[in-house]
Amino acid sequence: MLRRGGLSGGPSDLLSARRRGSVRLAAAVAAAITALAVLGRSSDPASKPLPASVTVGAAIALTGNANLYGQDQRMGLALAQQWLSSTAQPRPMRLQLEDGASDEPSAIAAFNLLIRRGVIALIGPTLSQQAFAADPIAQRQGVPVVAPSNTAQGIPQIGSFISRVSAQSSVIAPLSLDEALERDPEISRVAVFFAQDDAYSTAETAIFQKALAQRGLTPVSVQRTQLADNDFQNPITAALQQKPQLVVISAQAVDGGNLIRQLRELGYRGQIVVGNGLNTPNIYPICQRWCDGVLIAQAYSPDLNTPINQTFRRLFQEANGNSTPGQITAQAWTAYQVLFEALQRLQERGGLDGVTLGEARRRLMQELLAGTYDTPLGPIHFRPDGEVVQGRFYVAVVTMEANGRDGRFRLVRSIDVNTAAGGPTP
C-alpha cells in the first residue's frame, strides 16, 4: 500500500518526478534568461531613441606617462569646441572627457563607461597600445572611434567602426632619415634605441630599421629600453662604443626626452632622429638645450598657410600666450572637427530622424568615412577601412631658445605623400 499510496514510490515514479522537476527547473531558467535579456536590451542606450543633443566621449591620457600627450589633446579638443560653438548646429554636440590614463585597463574602463553613458562616438585613446585593447570593445558595440594619435600599423583594421586622423608611422617616420642622410651623406654607422614595452615604439623601430636597410644601412647597435626608465647610462655606453654617426630613437616623450639629454651629456655629438612619440613641445623642459638639432617628421606644421590653420593658431596663442601649437593638439582638434561635421551633414539630410542611438552610430560612421575635411592638418579624407588620407607631411628640426627651456619645431621641408598608396608621391 505504501508503495501504491506513493509516500516513497517505485523507481518509475521517482524517475517521472525527477523529469517533471527538471522540466520545471529548465522552464524557470529559460524564463530568467529571457527576463535578463529583456532587461539588458532595455538598459542598453543603443536601443533607445537618439536624444536631441548628442555626446561625443573622449578617453585621453590625463594621468600617467602619456599625460603630456593628453594635455595637448585636451587643449585641441577645447579649442575645436570653442571654434565650432559659433557655427550652426542642427544637432547639438557636446563633449565628455574621461581619463584613459596611460595603460590598457584604464583605457578599457573609460571606453566602457562612456559607452554605457550613451555617447554617439569616441575619440581616443591616446596610445596605440591602449587602442589595441580598447578599440575592440567599441567595435563589438558598434560605436565609431576616431583615433587622434594612434600611429601604429593595424589600428583602423581592428574593425569597421575604427578610424584615425593620425597618419601611420610607416608613411611619416622615414622622411626624417632622408633629411639626416642629406645633411651628412657619409653616415654609415647608426645606433637604434626603442622602448620595448610599448606597442607604438616597437612598431615604429621596425619601420625605421626597414627604412635604414632600404638605404643600405645596418645598425651597429640596437638598444632596448623601457618606458619607465630614467637612467640610460648602460645602453648609451654600449651604443657609443660602436661610434655611431646617427642615433634613431622610438620612445615616448618622457623617456625619449631623458634619453636625448643623457646622450648629449655622455658626449654624443652626431645627428639624432626621433619618432612620433616625441612630437610634442612638452619635450622641451625634459631634454632642454640638448633637444636642439633633433630631427623629426611631422603630420602638422604651424606654418601651413590656410584659413583654418590660421584660426587654429590664433585660438591656441590666445589661450597659451605666443607659443606655437604642436601636432598632437592639431590632431585632437581634427578628430573633434571631423565628427562634428559628419554629424551635422547627416542631420541636415534627415539621416538622424526617428532612429535609435545604435542606428545613429552606424550611420555616423558611414558619413564620417564618406566626407572630406579642411583641417589644420590640411585637406583629409578616409579610406574605406578608416585610414586617413593626407597629402602633405613635414620634416622639422628642434630649435631651442637661449634659456634652454623654450623652443619650437622649425620647418625644414614639406613633402607630398600619397598616403592612400602608402608612400611619397612619385
Image (tube, grey):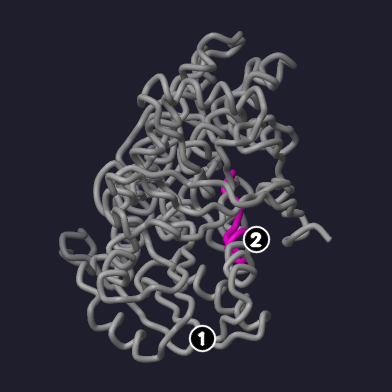
Task: Answer few, some or many: residues within 10 Å of disc 2's Cα (few below 14, many 20 plus, some between 14 and 19).
Answer: many
Asked whether 289 falls inside the magenta stretch, the response is: no
Q: Secondary structure at mark 1?
A: loop
Q: Which mark is residue 326?
A: none
Image point 49% across, 82% down: which residue?
A: 190
Q: Which residues are magenta?
A: 164-174
Q: Is residue 30 above or below residue 268?
A: above
The residue where tag 2 is placed is 171
Is there any visible trace of residue 105 in the rendered image?
A: no
Q: The residue under label 2 is which amino acid type? A: Val
Q: Nearer the viewer, mark 1 or mark 2?
A: 1
Q: Which mark is residue 189?
A: 1
Q: The residue under label 1 is which amino acid type? A: Arg
Quarter of the view holding residue 290: bottom left
Image point 38% across, 67% down: which residue?
A: 198
Quarter of the view holding residue 63: top left
Q: CA distance from mark 1 to mark 2?
A: 23 Å
Q: Is residue 315 left or right of residue 26?
A: right
